Amino acid sequence: MRIIKLFGEFMYNWREKRLKKAVLALENGEVFSGWSFGAAVDVNGEVVFNTGMTGYEEIVSDPSYAGQFVALTAAEIGNYGTNARDMESRKLFLNGLVIQDLNYPSNYRSEKPLDVLLKEYGVPGIGGIDMRRLTKILRSEGTQKAFMHCSDKDMSGMECVKAAGMWRGLDGLDYASQVSVDKPYLWNESGVFNVTAVDFGIKYGILRRLEENDMRVTVVPAVTSAENILKMKPDGVVLSNGPADPGAVRYAMDCVKALVGKVPLMGICLGHQLFGIAMGAGYGRLKFGHHGCNHPVKNLLTGNVEITSQNHNFALEADRLPSCLELTHINLNDGTVEGVRHRSEPAFGVQYHPEAAPGPNDSAYLFAHFKEIMGR
Amino acid sequence: MPKRTDIKKIMLIGSGPIVIGQGCEFDYSGVQACKVLKKEGYEIILVNSNPATIMTDPEFADRTYIEPLTADILHEIIRRERPDALLPTLGGQTGLNLAMELHGRGILKRYGTELIGAPAESINKAENRQLFKQTMLSIGLELPRSGSAHSLKTALAVAEAIGSWPLIIRPGFTLGGTGGGIAHNRGEFIDIVTRGLKASKNTEVLIEESLLGWKEFEMEVMRDKKGGSVIVCSIENLDPMGIHTGDSITVAPIQTLTDTEYQKMRDGSLRVMEAIGVETGGANVQWAVNPEDGRQIIIEMNPRVSRSSALASKATGFPIAKIAALLAVGYTLDEISNDITGETSACFEPALDYVVTKIPRFAFEKFPKADPVLGTQMKSVGEAMAIGRTFKQSFQKALRSLETGRAGFGSDGCDEKYESSDDGTLENELKTAGCDRVFYIRSAFKRGWTVEKIHELTKIDAYFLRNMEELAAFENEIASAGDISGLERDRGLFFQAKEFGYSDRQIAHILQCSESDVMKARKNLGIRPVYSVVDTCAGEFEAKTPYYYSTYGEYSEPVRPRNGRKSIMILGGGPNRIGQGIEFDYCCVHAAFALKSAGYESVMVNSNPETVSTDYDISDKLYFEPLTLEDVMNVYERENCDGVIVQFGGQTPLNLASRLSEAGADIIGTSPADIELAEDRDFFKELAAKLGINHPPGGIAYGTEDAVRVASEIGYPVLVRPSFVLGGRGMVIAYREGHLREYVDSASADSGGKPILIDRFLEDATELDVDCISDGNTVAIGAIIEHVEPAGIHSGDSAGIIPPVTISEEAEDKIRVYTCELAKHLRVCGLMNIQFAVQSGKVYIIEANPRASRTVPFASKAIGVPMAQLATKCMLGESLGNLGFTEEIKIPYTAVKEAVFPFIKFPGADAVLSPEMRSTGEVMGIDCSRGLAYLKSQLAAGNGLPESGGVFISVKDADKDAAAEIVKELFGMGFVIYATRGTSTMLYNKGIRTEAVFRISGGRPNLLDLLDEGRIQWVITTAEGGEEAMVDEIRMRSQAISRGVPTTSTVPGMFSALAGIKEKRDFGRLEVCSLQEYHRRRGRGEAR
């Protein structure tokens, strides 16, 4: 069978899993030992766990994970390989991948094994980790700064813990401009509406959804000013998802403030936070964030529940919303803010990922809604 | 939206007897539904014919009807109860079909009973192939490509348009579907089409793309009335399309689909729900995926809870049936909270951080002539499930959970058959799946066959094959340690072996040492399993429910405090098989109830996903683990249990008992030594003699010559069987030496050196089962059950009646005395089942088993006393006096149990009743009239007694007078009477005209011909003694059973049946009454 032969040479066997030792150390002193795959390098990152059972390729290529180690709780990873179509951006931005078990790819769509993809972008991975132990720590102690030791260098567990603690972390850092494109580009040629997407770390999934909804999309760098955006005379503006702390993306606040009321606006994830904060909402860090494909969100306008794909550590706070914003969506698990809209202007944002990729497509209606408000 | 208040009384239909394809998973779903709806304040009316279910315990519904599942009977119940609503989606296909019939006949409408859960149109859309296809096409889902043709030329064009081989060709309008086939290439296609066009009455062939070898997936979907939908669980079949899902090894969650493909399937599944119009509740959607291009084809959807949803519930912790019941009464998913976390919403999709493997359990050893090749007809009788952190781990755990003697994926000393097969055999075994194909796969890897080659032969996805390849290779890695001390020096390797799911027993086999050596070395290194919670959320939230599985890792859930209570472990029965099924699970569940009410903590260990016992709501702690010494002791030690109950789970825990005891577990109730003693023939013989109880002469033989010697001493016919079996495995009656030799030669091959037991067979005797409880001092008889069939047919396969009919008071009293004496001398604490035989008024003891029996649930329902619960309390030290059960209960009504057989699923297998048990399930008929109770039991078992038509009668001389009386009545009622020559002459002399036919061995036409022609609706036969008559008798019964024709084989049975038929004719219909009302009558001590 074609699929199998293609990757016969990439073997992870049990011996490697035992011998290529690697360490994941957390700032709180917890040390995990496992085996290394991907790039054999040492790196810092903030550990978050993602409970999605499919979509590891979309996750590793999601720019929102810049600066982070993603721990995938799904038991078996790598099973279906990776392919160019499922990439969510032009490269991998995460700092490291933490898994429990790595498998050979078996799927007709597979072009290269996950291990190879990670190596190509210099991203280390650590396998053989007891995910329950890790999630339990993150659940009770919150997101942790961490250090992943995958190189040959001799380092003790204590040294790794120290390295984890010494890292400055993500707070207050503007990662968005780092992962954003340098200059504007056109995503697709044709469409009924002209949409400008501000790239704070945009996922291709968003662009694909916009395209599917008859929009001609121009992607612009995170630091683009409102003036320049409006000069493009867009029918609507999308504020994309992106990594890290919304508070650090100050330049975007002014831009958003200037755009609201001038042009229909849709914010997704970080984009939604920026929209909210720009309108005066308060925000905070969640204890361990939402990362997964099974978060139930209730649409307060319709009463319907949608299962959503999520990936965020920060959130707007329901009791600190300005009067101009209306709460439209809440998370059924913990009641946190999942969506807001402007009471008088055509502008809304959702905390989750209506573009899915990975995750359920239940919220795709939001793109149609965006189209509708542009058409008004 | 709150629950509906316009409905108050809800009727639920159970799925009836356990049959292949419909097992105890529907008891699990029914129990959940009853519990939750009752809690919501609804009045519950439950109907089910299966007495072995927990749901038919009187506490679970307001009124429980143990009545035959026919539309007429349901009509009676509806007329009596006037329920506001009928919930049909929890009783399997049986429930759904009955609901549709009630709907179709306008009964629901007439009584204003609303179908909730799934409306009739939706059920119809899902069940009707044509409608289903249309609906699927209308929502843009793909079906297999197909077309029809009236000539070879158009057929070739159709083939071209479909564009892939193989193709399935079915001629239109043929008799018996002849002339079709599967074409793998153009040549074959032309042949088959040409043949098919000829065979078809309208010269038409239907050509369809074959999905054989495609990947197969399932999604379990829940939907509420607002359209809120979630996928509870996704399942991937390891075995590809072409093998029934029920017979496939399956894995959750899906392993080999990219997110894009998974979401496409998810979207499709949700669209199916909407298009079919499932308003509320669960459904299962099945998909086939082409591994070459990912094309997804919808196979079917079931608009109800199913076997897969039971599995999905156990695999994820999401209680599908319970939620489905809540949705049916108007709640929406977001209004229901997730039990497991207690905080989050039920409207979510469980995330798994482990792999679940389910492996079916087969019973081909019971049906030697049945075709053991797996196909689209389901053949498995049960299943085991295991949870592990990796596929390898869960796969190996599942294999050892099957209790087929395997300790995992090979390397356990049982590989000889597979390793010694030649390449050709191996190739065939890989191509055509049998029940043990994975072991052939292991051998193929051992032989150096590649994943590619094995994939070509099996079509199993490379993902699974590679994991198997790694396991096969890893054996050598373990072996490279040299010996156990070598492994002890390499902790990394040892740990990895455990991570890969290797049991101590496998490691012991590889390193040529004992299992306890491995255990010792393992503990020296501190390698112990850790336990994780099945929490629906991959650790994201804290789990409240104590539902655990073991794995090898770093973090173990802390042991929950038991608040000063003592902790007792209950060992379940493992996968269902013939002879060990739901009856034992029933007892285990009752043990958990009893422990709870007595203030103990209950710890359930079991590996069967279908059961009520593996519902996390039943016990204080649930461990989903294989029932092996290693896995059980690990839990016992972790929980620091104060005792373990082994007498309820059937043979599985009993086989472990003495080793558990040696390993330090405290077995409560009758001691393992005493249980074994009861099996000890010499001891038992002596005991019987000492107590003055007749015992058929018998002996033990260790080989053929020995057996012949023993048999000649005690005299033929003899009953022969291997020792230590449940369900009469390998048991026969031998009438002469040749027959005996034949049996012993074949049996000693697989008896594993265990002795063969030989007893004098009591011809023409009546058998009785007695279930009793002892607290160590007092003995109380639960019920004396008389078998309807003559001795020689396994007790599990014969009908039984409470109270006995033909036994004299004197014999009954003797049986009571013997029972009490035996219980005392065997030091029974808990349950005991004794089998007696009465021959010419003389009482013999056949055997005594100090453990739960198959008849405990039936007896408990009949007398209205939860025997297993009382027995559990006795084991805890309570006295029967304190429990208020010291007197045998005399019931003023009759309860009849009848067995249900799977022969129809095994064409080719001899449908023969014998001392070996073959039935998969049972039904109960209960009525104030003995005749009607019998009638109902037959109706419930699917062999309804006729009110008109043909009756075949053949009776032995002694019964001829009685028979004449009966036949006269039947004749008067307009039945056509067929009789064997002797009986016919006798009847003629009494003035009754009959049609004479031959006995089976006497010529033709005989009964079998008449059965074939459909002229017989009832067989009445009482057999002469002797081999020939016995053989005839058995063939007759078997043929009748496989055609659903009722058979009556005793004179009292005939009178009962006749009385029943007359009463029914007089009254015009069958009356129904709830179990609760019967039990109240019992309480009032109404006269019989």
Image (cartoon, rainbow, N blue to C red):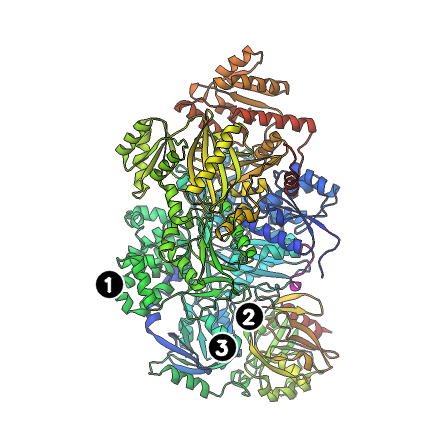
Secondary structure beneath dot 1 equals loop
Q: Which residue is mark 2?
A: B541
Distance CA(mark 3)–CA(mark 2): 34 Å
Q: What is the C-alpha distance between the residues marked 3 and 1?
A: 50 Å
Q: Crowding near pointer 2: few (<14 within 10 Å), some, many (20+)?
A: some
Q: Are marks 3 and 1 in contact (CB under 8 Å)?
A: no
Disc 3 residue crowd, few under 14, some 14–19, many 20+, Cα 10 Å: some
The residue lying toward the viewer, choosing from A74 and B258, is A74
A212, above or below B921, in the image: below
Q: Which mark is residue B482?
A: 1
Q: Nearer the viewer, residue B420 or B902?
A: B902
Q: Nearer the viewer, mark 3 or mark 1?
A: 1
Q: Which residue is mark 3?
A: A90
Q: Amino acid at mark 1?
A: Gly
Give, as a three-letter code, the residue at label 3: Arg
Q: Do marks 3 and 2 share a chain?
A: no
Q: Which residues are magenta?
A: B327-335
- SS at badge 2: loop
| Chain on which label 3 sits | A
Task: Reply above or below: A94 against B417.
Answer: below
Mark 1 crowd level (few <14, some 14–19, many ≥20, 10 Å Cα): few
Identify the chain of the residue marked 1, using the numbered disc in the image: B
State which tag comes first along the sequence, 2 or 1: 1
Q: Residue B31 at what x, y percent from top left?
A: 59, 51
The three-letter code of the residue at mark 2 reads Phe
x, y percent for residue B253: 49, 61
Work out how far the residue at label 2 is from the one at label 1, CA to CA, in angstroms: 44 Å
Tell me, yes or no, if residue B81 can be seen here. yes
* Secondary structure of residue under mark 3: loop
Chain on which label 2 sits: B
In the rendered image, the quadrant that contains the N terminus of chain B is bottom right
Is there one chain holding both mark 3 and mark 1? no
